[in-house]
Structure formats: C-alpha cells, structure tokens
Amino acid sequence: MSEKTKASYLKTKSVLLSKTFVFVLFILTIFVLGYILLFAKPYSEGNVALVNMDYELGIIKSDLQTYNKLSDENINDILNALKETAIRDTLPVGLLHCINRVESEYQFNIIHPVVNVLVKGKMITTNAVGTGGIMWVYWGDSLKKYRNIQMESDLFFPVKSIKATGYILRWMINDELRISRIDTARKINSLNILSKIVKRYYGAYSDIYLSRMQNVTSDLWMKRIANDIINKKDTVANHVILNKETIKKE
C-alpha cells in the first residue's frame, strides 16, 4: 500500500470514527433527556398534583375507616373510584368525598327523601339514589350516554355512584363558569361559584348541606376546593354544555 493510499485510508477511517462518535453521543443525549423528562421530575406540575391528591386520599381513607360498616375492600374501592373520577373529570378529590360523605356517608342502600323535580317541563315526584344522591329521572339519559351507567340500580354500587357524581359536578362547574364568563360584569368568585354548584346539586337543602360539607372538612379545605374549581381546566369530553333545565327540588 502506497503512502498516499494509506493516508487516504486513515483519513477515511478517522472521519467514520468521528461520525460514529457523534452519532453515539447524539443517541446518548436523547436517552438522557428522555429519562430526565419522564422520570427525573418528581416535582413537575402533574406529579405535584398527584402527590397532593394522594395526600388528600390518605386523609379521606382515615375518615372512611371511622365507618364501622365499611370493610377494607369497600374502602379501597371507594378510594380508587374517587381518584379515577377526580383525574378523569378534573375535579378536587375533596369535593367528591364531601358530596358522597354528606349525602349518604357512603351507605349505598340509604333511603333519600322524596322530592319534586322539574324535568322537561313536568314536575315529577321521586327520590335520589346511591351514595351521591343522584336523580335518575333527571340525569339518567346523560349518564347512559357519557358514563355507561345503564340503569338506576347501577347507582347502588358506590363506584358507579361516584362516577355519576363526578360527571354531574363537572357539568355543573362547566355551566357555572360559562355563565360567569358570559356575564362579564360579574367577577368570578371561587366561593360564590362553589356555593352555586352546591345549590344546584342539593336544591332546597343546599344551605344545610354546604354547612355539613364544611363540618366534615374545614374552612380552609373548602376554600382550597373552591379555588381548585376555578383553576382546574375542564376536560375536553365535558366541555360542551348540554341543554339542561335547572333542577328544582321542593
């Protein structure tokens, strides 16, 4: 091999080695960045939200353990349903717990008071069902369509009742926020929004229930729930406001 050929060979080899080194370095850089983005951000916004939720669920678990009629399996099912629903419907998990706690103390077979409900222009005498106190005559069609809850009897299962409660709360929050944004003269107040949502959920009993909700949490936790309602972005699946009439209970 001539000196010229040997020099050309060494030069080509050097270039290939340099390119290989750069390529390997590029792959390693991508891998490291991917690892950092996926695993090395324990205090990112999403992870902090989940850490906070898990902390609140721990408090809720302690509360549920004070109920003599709930087994450990029941409690775990309820906690999983609360977490799943809070994430899916972008809701404060404390709000979901308060509603079910005040409505029924998670007694699936509770007998709710008989009330009159205005549905499609007709006054219907009925009663709520399940741990979340759901009015099937009013919400049944929507729950069938959006949450695959096919029958009123499904609401006797706490997990499905929590899922239904989440849908209804998300719908009411979206509607109240929509009204507030249209009425530009009215400043959005988180506690005012929460009060209106509770009033729509409980109807004539709203003042009593709002007081009970505060009793089972605290004034500060209620303020946090109210602020979360304003600050959390609603989910795309529930963004469209359906043409519903306001529930009236007597």
Image (cartoon, grey):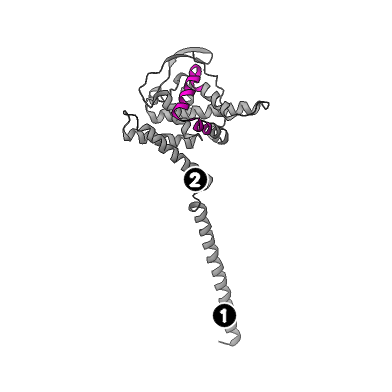
Q: Which mark is residue 10?
A: 1
Q: How many angstroms separate mark 1 from mark 2 (CA)?
A: 52 Å
Quarter residue 107 falls in:
top left
69 to the left or right of 230: left
Disc 1 element:
helix
Q: Position of residue 58 (x, y in %)?
A: 41, 38
Query: Mark on residue 47?
Result: 2
The secondary structure that dominates the magenta segment is helix
Q: Nearer the viewer, residue 153 or 6?
A: 153
Residue 68 in the image, given as x and y percentages of width and height = 31, 29
Q: Residues within 10 Å of mark 2 (few under 14, many from 20)?
A: few
The part of the image, by quadrant, that contains residue 161 is: top left
Question: Is 76 located above or below residue 16 in the figure?
Answer: above
| Amino acid tagged 1 | Leu
Q: Earlier in the sequence, mark 1 or mark 2?
A: 1
Do the CB atoms of the residues marked 1 and 2 lie less than 8 Å apart?
Answer: no
Describe residue 192's horizontal placement relative to residue 132 as left or right. right
